[in-house]
Image: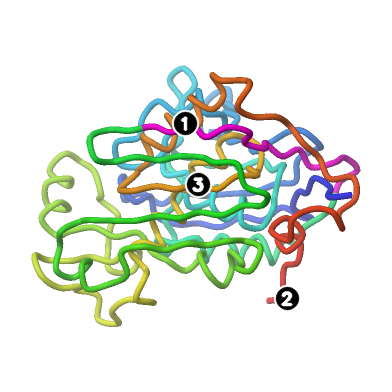
């Protein structure tokens, strides 16, 4: 049986909020069966818990942000992507501010911390959402879709019209039957443009953005001294983001996600459209793990650090 999983032990770390520029303390703690991914603002009195659910996402302008009343937690997508990639179903995420720390701008730091904490199987089957009918969402020339597929595959195409990005791979595809999150997705960093950073900072945003936690470009070039980690880093990071956005569903997908120029807003609208059409999906479990697609058994194998 493919079982639900949580982390074995709690861990804490400190990082910088991408937009606030403030130091943020982050703690991940084990959670019981069917808890899901639950964020807690422990700096509020009383602390506020916000479960990762599509309807809790109401701000996607610069990141994926959860809210509940006056409580907000922004920039959850990289951590959610790592939790998805490592097959963590249940976890309490505590922060003492309104943002998840940006770390190095990818999912790699979260992968390292989760691996160090360890992963524990729980006494309940893992619940998957299997897509039965195609679902699409469009906004101008941008689009995203979910299609029936016996496994988990993501395909993403980008088009930024920027010389440095145009010189790299414009399309990436990851089929988790034969790829792994750790090796093929986690290391791709977020990216931005100097001109945008100057404007954002004038609005009090991107205060923590540096060459240490993002790929930054001027009008023509990548400014990071070490360049890119791979020729597909830009497209791959958009795929990493999509994995995090889709995991807000609360369950892993059995589907093929396809997108062109999609972002946090379209990804969330795609989930909402899926849930609004009950005949387009169903819950499934795999009582016999040998009959599950390799994508879901491969995710259970986490190599040692």
Residue corresponding to mark 2: 304
Residue corresponding to mark 3: 257
> What SS does tag 2 mark?
loop
Image location (x, y in percent) of residue 12: 61, 55
Q: Which residue is drawn at 23% across and 58% down?
A: 192
Q: Is residue 23 left or right of residue 179?
A: left
Residue corresponding to mark 1: 66
User: Which quadrant is the C terminus positioned in?
Assistant: bottom right
Queried whether the magenta region covers residue 129, the answer comes back as yes
Mark positioned earlier in the residue sequence (1 or 2): 1
Q: Give yes or no for contact between labels 1 and 2 (Cβ–Cβ under 8 Å).
A: no
* Dot 3 crowding, Cα within 10 Å, few <14, some 14–19, many 20+: many
Q: Is residue 65 left or right of residue 146?
A: left
Inter-mark Cα distance, 3 to 1: 22 Å
Q: Is residue 8 above or below residue 231?
A: above
* Dot 2 crowding, Cα within 10 Å, few <14, some 14–19, many 20+: few
Closest to the observer, 8 or 44: 8
């Amino acid at each position: 049986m493919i079982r639900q999983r949580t982390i074995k032990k709690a861990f804490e770390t400190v990082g910088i909020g991408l937009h606030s520029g403030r130091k943020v303390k982050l703690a991940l703690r084990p959670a019981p069966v069917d808890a899901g991914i639950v964020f807690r603002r422990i700096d509020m009195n009383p602390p506020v818990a916000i479960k990762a659910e599509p309807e809790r996402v109401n701000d996607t302008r610069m990141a994926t942000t959860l809210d509940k009343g006056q409580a907000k937690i922004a920039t959850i997508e990289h951590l959610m992507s790592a939790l998805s990639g490592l097959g963590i179903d249940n976890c309490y995420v505590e922060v003492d501010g309104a943002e998840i720390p940006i770390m190095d701008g990818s999912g790699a730091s979260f992968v390292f911390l989760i691996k160090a904490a360890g992963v524990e199987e729980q006494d309940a089957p893992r619940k998957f959402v299997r897509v039965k009918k195609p679902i699409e969402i469009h906004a101008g020339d941008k689009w995203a879709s979910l299609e029936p597929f016996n496994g988990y595959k993501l395909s993403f195409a980008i088009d930024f019209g920027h010389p440095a990005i145009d010189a790299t791979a414009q399309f990436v595809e990851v089929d988790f039957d034969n790829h792994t999150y750790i090796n093929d997705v986690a290391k791709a960093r977020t990216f931005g443009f100097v001109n945008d950073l100057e404007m954002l900072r004038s609005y009090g945003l991107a205060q923590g953005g540096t060459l240490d936690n993002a790929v930054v470009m001027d009008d023509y070039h990548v400014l990071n001294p070490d360049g890119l980690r791979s020729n597909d880093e830009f497209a791959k990071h958009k795929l990493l983001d999509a994995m995090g956005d889709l995991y807000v569903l609360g369950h892993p997908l059995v589907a093929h996600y396809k997108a062109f120029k999609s972002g946090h807003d379209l990804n969330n609208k795609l989930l909402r459209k899926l849930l609004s059409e009950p005949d387009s999906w169903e819950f499934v479990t795999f009582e016999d793990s040998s009959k599950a697609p390799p994508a879901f058994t491969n995710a259970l194998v986490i190599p040692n650090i």
